[in-house]
Structure formats: structure tokens, C-alpha cells
Amino acid sequence: MKKNALTIGIIILIFLSVSLPLSLGFKVNQSFIINDGNTLYVGGGGPGNYTSIQAAIDDALDGDTVFVYDDSSIYYENNIIISKSIKLIGENKDSTIIDGGDEDILIIYDANNVSLSGFKIQNGRYGIRLGSSSYSLFSDNIFINNRLDGILMSNSSYNTISENIFQYNDYGISLDWSLSAPGPCLYNNILNNTISNSSYRGIQLSLYQRYNYIFGNTIENNNKEGVMICCSSNFNVVYHNNFIANGVNAKDEINNTWDDGYPSGGNFWDDYTGIDADGDGIGDTPYNISGGDNMDRYPLMKPWGVNHPPDAPIINGPTSGKPGVEYNFSFVSTDPEEDDLYYLIDWDDGYEDVIGIYPSGTEAYASHAWAEKGTYIISAKAVDTSGAESGLGEFTVTIPRNRLLNTLFLNILRSYPNIFQFIQRLIQI
């Protein structure tokens, strides 16, 4: 009975995971179910630690973690096979290095819920070759100088590749039909990676790769195409990526989606020649994708996810005044992306103000009165509509004592010494 119930549950889960993305525009929220087990250590010199990554993986059970120390040396290993649900974690992606010696480095086959992070994977044929595997996460790694692909994926679905750096590979990421793992890749997420200097292509989808989601990546200086989609690979979604200085920024021979509608927008294209007359950050004319009839209907006018802080505000106003009197001050800052601004003002007497929103470069005004004498330093920050804060602008104001008795009145009082001495006792001049 328990076995039958489990089977029914799995069938329901598979049905939901396949059907839901279709109704949600392919924005797949993936969960990675890896139970916490034991931790096996590689390197580090501790008692019982393994000297090779493969040996630790061989002894690991589903749900275990294999932690690899950087050890200030390189792990010369290749054809590392992962066929179980484990976490493989490197101590530091810049210094925990696996060198494949021109062979495949990591082969993940018929293994779901694998998590890999914290490695520099270099000098292999394929950095990772993933086949017949699902619900795995590859994040915060560096794939560099691999002869073919940083990651090659085939017949694998619901995986996420995020926050990685791909440099100087022939292909950064490929989703392809492989003879060793025949079948399409469906509902995978390629998110927030930097993919550059590939000899051929940054990302390639070929032979029936469908419903994949490519979002938030910076794809630059790749020799041929930044992204290439061909060979019956359709229904994929590509937006909020930055395409910069590729041989051809993108080529699509099939039917895919290259934007997220308005006002979310599409991608940033460094060779887009349109204008933004209404100032909404989206080009007024579409960007045509090479290879067919596809277009980005809402190209972004500035790179996605790149935001520079505004300049520190310049403050102007009176440099002195009297207690209890309001004085006007101006604040002005310029934002590199011409975002609108608001200002956070500290009057240095326990009071603060927030004013805005104002266009970049436009003077904003605020008034304030100080109750007591003293020297006050007004400080202000400009904050753009993307949340980036400027440095502090400062301005000094001196508020002298509020003298109730002016010089003429004092001279008159001094003509009557007795009265003058009496008033002196009452008021400190």
C-alpha cells in the first residue's frame, strides 16, 4: 500500500512540474531536494580525509556532502563520475581547482538532485557533461579553458545553472542531443552567469531543446554568436540578458521569445540603434534577431542589473541664521544612468527628511529651523530609483545665540546702571 501511494505521489508531482511552467510562462521555480547526510572531506590534511575527489564520491551516499579543501594545489583528476544525489562543494572557487588534462572532468549521469559549487574547472574536454539527470544546481563556479563546453547538457530537465563564470571555452553552455544520453532538455534555468570569450558560442540550444529559461546573463566577447538557437529548439524564453561585443549577438532560426513584455522589457543589445523618446528605459522600435523572424520587442536601453550610484549631492543655502527661523536649502545630484532621485537629509539636530522624487540633475529644495544655537553640518545622500546610494554631501550652518537685546537697547540701559545690573542678573547676555 505504501509503495502504491508513493508511486501515485510521484506521478502527481511529475504532472504538476510539467504542466505548471506552461501556465506560468516557463518561469520555473525549482526546488532541490537533498537531505542533509554526512560530510566527507577531501584534502585539508585531517585524519581520514580523502586525497582524491572521486574516492570520496565513491564512498558517499545519497544526501551526503563532499567538501573539497583548496590545499593551495590543483586536483589533477578527470572522468569524475557522479551517479548519486550529493553535494560537491569546493572551499573557494578561485583556488579549489580541478584540472582535467584535456579529458572530461565531471560526468554526471542518471543522477538527480546534484549540487555543485565553489570550483574552478579548467583544461578539460567538457567541464561538466550532464546526461539523463534532473533537479540539479550548478552555481558559483568558474569554467575556464575547456576545449569543448563548459557545461554540456542532454536529456536533462529542471536543472539550474546560475552565478557561474564561463571564460575561454569553445562553448560556454550547450543544450544538445547526445548519442550517450539521447533526448531533449526541458525547463532548465540558465540564470545570472557571465559567459565570455568563447571560441564559438556563449550559449547554444540545438535539436529539440524546449521551454528553457535564459535570464540575467552577461554574454560578451564570444567569437561567433552570443546565443544560438536552432534545429527545432523552440518555446524557449530569453530576456534581461546583456549582449555585448559578440560576433553576432544572437541568432535564432526557430520560434522563441526574446522579451518579457512591457514594461519588464527584453534584453540589452550593444548594437541597438533605436531611441527611447518617452524615457521609459525601453527602445521605441524592436531589435531584430538574426536567422529568422524573431525580435526583441522591448529592447533595454541600458544593461540589465548594472547600476552606478549617483554623485554626492551639492548643497547650497545660507551659512548662518537664527534659532527658530526656517531656512531653505537646495540639493542637486546627477545619476550616471539618468535615473530619478530622492534625497535623504540629516539636519544634525536629531531630525531627518526624505524628499523626492526628482529628475537627475534637477535642484530639490527643503527647509529647516534649528531650535538652539550651534554649528550644524547638514549631510545628504542621493538615492536612485534602483536603490543605489551616493556618497555624503555636506554643508555647514552656524546658528548664533538669539540676542533679545540689541546694541541700541543695551546702550540705553547702561545709562541707568542700577536697572542694567538688575537685568544682567535676570538675563545672561
Image (cartoon, rainbow, N blue to C red):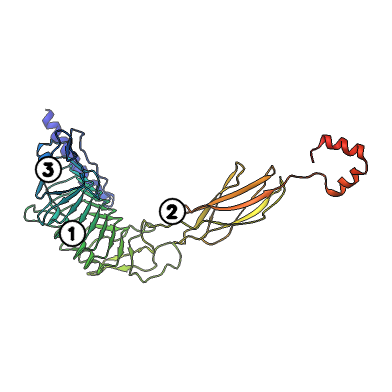
Q: Earlier in the sequence, mark 3 or mark 1?
A: 3
For marks 1 and 2 on the same chain, the one whose residue lies earlier in the sequence: 1
Q: Which amino acid does label 3 sit on?
A: Ser
- Could you tell me residue 262's position as x and y percent? 37, 59
Label 1 element class? loop
In this view of the protein, can residue 405 be seen by the observer? yes
Callout 1–callout 2 Cβ contact below 8 Å? no
Q: Mark 3 points at which residue?
A: 52
Which residue position holds label 2?
386
In the displayed orientation, state which residue is furthest to the top. 1
Determine whether the residue tagged by mark 2 lies in a helix, strand or loop.
Answer: loop
Q: Position of residue 399 (x, y in %)?
A: 69, 48
Q: Do the residues labelled 2 and 3 touch (CB within 8 Å)?
A: no
- Which residue: 31% across, 55% down? 216
Quadrant for the N terminus, please: top left
Q: Where is residue 141 in the image (x, y as percent from the top left)?
A: 23, 50
For the residues labelled 3 and 1, say whether their Cβ atoms are less than 8 Å apart.
no
| 373 displayed left or right of 49 | right
Q: Mark 1 to mark 2: distance in Å?
A: 36 Å
In this image, 252 relative to 342: left or right? left
Residue placed most toward the observer, 299 or 342: 342
Residue 269 or 258: which is nearer the viewer? 269
With respect to residue 323, does 425 lie above or below?
A: above
Residue behind mark 1: 145
Q: Which residue lies furthest to the right in this view?
A: 416
- The reply, left or right, for residue 281 in relation to residue 254 is right
Residue 175, quarter of the rendered image? bottom left
Which of the marked residues, 2 or 3, is nearer the chain's N terminus?
Answer: 3
Instruction: Please tell me how crowded label 2 is: few (under 14), some (14-19), or many (20+) other residues with Cα within 10 Å.
Output: some
Q: What is the C-alpha distance between the residues marked 3 and 1? A: 22 Å
